[in-house]
Each structure stands twice: as structure tokens, then as C-alpha cells.
Amino acid sequence: MLKQTLSQKLSQKLSPQQIQLMKLIQLPLQDLEQRIKEELESNPALEEESDTYESQDEFSSDADAESEERIESDDIDIDQYLSDDEIPEYRLKSNNYSPDDDEYEAPVVTTTTFYESLNEQLGWKSLSEEDLKLARYLVGNLDEDGYLRRELSAITDDLAFSMGVMTTEDKLESLLGAIQTLDPPGVGARDLQECLYLQIKRKRETVDVALARTIIHDFYNEFTRKHYDKIVHRLDISEKELKQALEVIGKLNPRPGNSVESGRTISQAITPDFIISIVEGELELTLNARNAPDLNVSGEYKNMLESYKAQGKKKDKRVTEAAQFVKQKLDAAKWFIEAIQQRQQTLLITMSSIMNYQKDYFLSGDEKDLRPMILKDIAEEINMDISTVSRVANSKYVLTPYGTFLVKEFFSESMTNQDGEEVSTREIKKILEESVAEEDKRKPLTDEKLAKLLKEKGYPIARRTIAKYREQLDIPVARLRKEL
């Protein structure tokens, strides 16, 4: 049975301006520059500041209130658009760098891609037109590392069904052999063993090279598992001879495609959002915004709206629609500029708190000085939501005297050492790295021995925790760290 009831419910809604601000906060500097360009292209009332711009009385409005109202073309009053309280000019401009900053222009670099290089070399081969077409199809199936990881039978089927070209696996095998003679050495291999073997075959013949070739061809499993004692015994060689052969193998390139810029890979330089420097023993924080242009509300659009006012309080539909369009664009421009300014303020407040919290580290550069710090610590200190701190930390880089780092790298959990003091997990990982670096590589320390060693240093950690930290640091297991 249906019935009507009355109920109250509390809910929270984000305004379009708040949503826009959150999206801007999470953008790193390079993405912000692109976002500003998009806004400039879509909103003619927003423009980059120029030297010839003349200051005028700026237009403003109660944007939040008017966004709730629908303006009817029958009763519009153009004077209403121009009667809002005026906002100072500085609030309608976003000054992201000083006039003294140098203009930076990225250098233009032209390179030959990995695939272009291979196709160019194929053109030098004595191949028929049909074979050249098949060989270039094989090149197109290589991955960015230079490997052919597809089965030749699958490629044969693709050629038959998609291109109507009939061929055989033996034919493709022969053409793959031609590709494997191209530069860089190792290209066209189907696995790591073949890649290393192709490279070592091209080296000038010496005793060490011959031994390295035998190890790769006949004792590859023992080599990958570092069962060096088995190789020494079965080849009847000394450890010195094995070590010299391993040095030859160690100089080979396991990813030959990376030696030439890949046409499918776009490398992007990191641009730090913050810069921390030490001036007379004190930390100084600056916001790097040199790639973001100065923005202001278009004076031309303001003049357009004033011209509508000069026409009087006419109820002309076309004038009404034009005034509404101009008003919306001016509002959007003002909202965007204010969002950029608030973004900068939020970034500075958040990073300043992080810098002060980790002051000892930023002064010394020693990771052992990093304090345990979680998002909640900073959020409570600056009286902001944890999600806001997370947006700042997850995608921003900071340039310090010791290198460029992701801001989120300075956050870590804590544990209690034997003295009852809270220490950062980053400190423990640093000690773990140092312990592995100082171990005897002939007999690397197992996770159990590492746990015992750190316990002796005052950090009681379980073996499974050691394994987790080791994996996070990309340190292989003891067996794979073994050296002669």
C-alpha cells in the first residue's frame, strides 16, 4: 500500500567551483599548463595578460547565487549584471611568475625511431619486393624491447586472413634471421637467451667470449639460477675463468630496442612543482609555476557588456541572449582564475607543512632523519581534508638540494624500535639497503639472516616484513644476489 511521508535528510553537495578546484589541485605542473591552454581556447573571456592590457573596473558577480537562477528573456535587466560589488583587480588575475623570470623554450629534438631505423636497414638488404613487405610486417610485430613475442604461426595466419598474403613459417623464419642481423644486436630475438646469444655471436672471438657463448647456449638454466659451482664442475674451468666470462655476459643488452628511441614511447621530463632550498641554514619553499601564464578577465568582454547597458533596459531577446552569454563567460573566467589562485595557496600551505614536519631531513638529506608521517598528520596541522593532502602528495614533485622526489615519498608508517622510539619505515628500508650492500656477495644474506641482523641493530622485524620491504626496494632474493 502506497502512502506519503515527510522526512528530513542532511546531504552535502559540491559546487561546480569546488569540483573544479579539486581537479586543478591534483594536476602536476605540466598537466596544469595544458589545462590552462584548454580553458583559454574554450573561453574567450579568459586571456593571457599582455603588456598592453589597460586596467579597467572589473566585472564581478555573486556567481554561486546566480548559478541557481534561470534568467528569463522576457524580464532581463541588463543593469543587474553590472551592479554587483566590484572585486579588486588583483583577484581577477593569476600571476604565476614574475616579469624577471626567464622565458623557457623547450629544445626541438628530432630522432629516428627504433622501427624507422630497422625499416631503413631492411632497405639495404637484397630482398625481393614481396620479402621486403613480409620483413617489414615482422618488424611491426616487434615490441618496444626489440623482441618478437608472437608465434610465427599466428603471424602467418594474420597475413593470410587480414592481408590475403599466403606464406609459410619457414619463410618467416628465414626473414626473421635477416632481421636478427640488423642493429642493434639482439633485435628480433624471441626470448632473453636468444637475445644474449645473438649479441655474443657478433663479438670478436676470444677465450672469454667463447666461454660466455657456451654458457649461454648450453648452461643457460644454471646461469640464470646462479648455480656457478655446477658450471665450473661440468666445464672443468676455474672460478676466475667463469668470472671473466660472466663479465662479458654482463655487458650485453637485455633490451636492445631501448638503445634506439622507440616510436611508441613518449618520454617526459619531470618538472618539479615545488623547490626547497637552504638559505643561510634555513629552509625556503617556492612554488614553481613558470610554465603557467598570467591570466586575467577579458577587458573586451567587459566593454561588450557595458555596451549592452548603454542600450537601456530593453526587452530585446537577442540583446538578452547576448548579455547572458557574455555574463556566463565572464563568470567562468573569474571562477577559473580564483581556482588557480586557491590551488597555489593550497599547494604552498600543504608543502610548507610537510617541509616543516620533515625539517631535519631537508637540512641533512639523510633518510634516517625522516620522521614517521601520514596524511592525517598534515591534514590536522593545516586544517584540511585528508583527500586534499592526498591530491597534493600523489602527483607533485619537489626539487630539493638532494634530488627531485615525489612528495608522497616523504610519507611513511612508523614502528617502535627496542628503545621504545617511533621510527619511520623509510629509515628501516635504508638500513636494509645498507645491510644488503655490505653483505658478502659470495654468500648473500637470506631474509631470515637479514631479520636477525636488523634485530641486533635495534629493529625487531619479522622475516616476512623483511621480504616485503626487500620487494618494495627491488632487491632480489639471496640466491640471485650471489656473485663470484
Image (cartoon, rainbow, N blue to C red):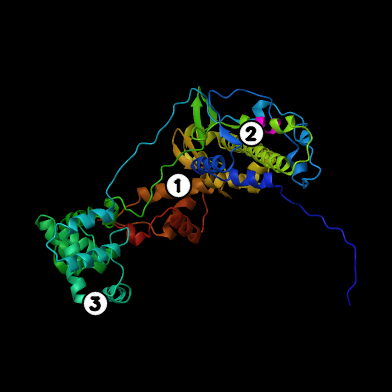
Tell me where residue 230 appears, x and y as whole percent: 22, 68
Decide: few, some or many residues near mark 2? Use Cα within 10 Å; few <14, some 14-19, many ≥20.
some
Q: Kindly report the secondary structure that dominates the magenta region of the rendered protein.
A: helix
Q: Secondary structure at mark 2?
A: helix
At label 2, the amino acid type is: Tyr
Amino acid type at circle 3 is Met
Q: CA distance from mark 1 to mark 3?
A: 61 Å
Q: Mark 3 highlights which residue?
A: 166
Task: Say above or below: 397 vs 155.
Answer: above
Q: Nearer the viewer, residue 75 or 214?
A: 75
Q: Secondary structure at mark 1?
A: helix
Q: Which residue is mark 2?
A: 301
| 24 with respect to 234 (left or right) | right
Q: Height in image: 222 above or below 76?
A: below
Q: Residue 19 vs residue 114: left or right?
A: right
How many numbered circles does the render carry?
A: 3
Mark found first going from the N terminus, 3 or 2: 3
Residue 107 in sight here: yes
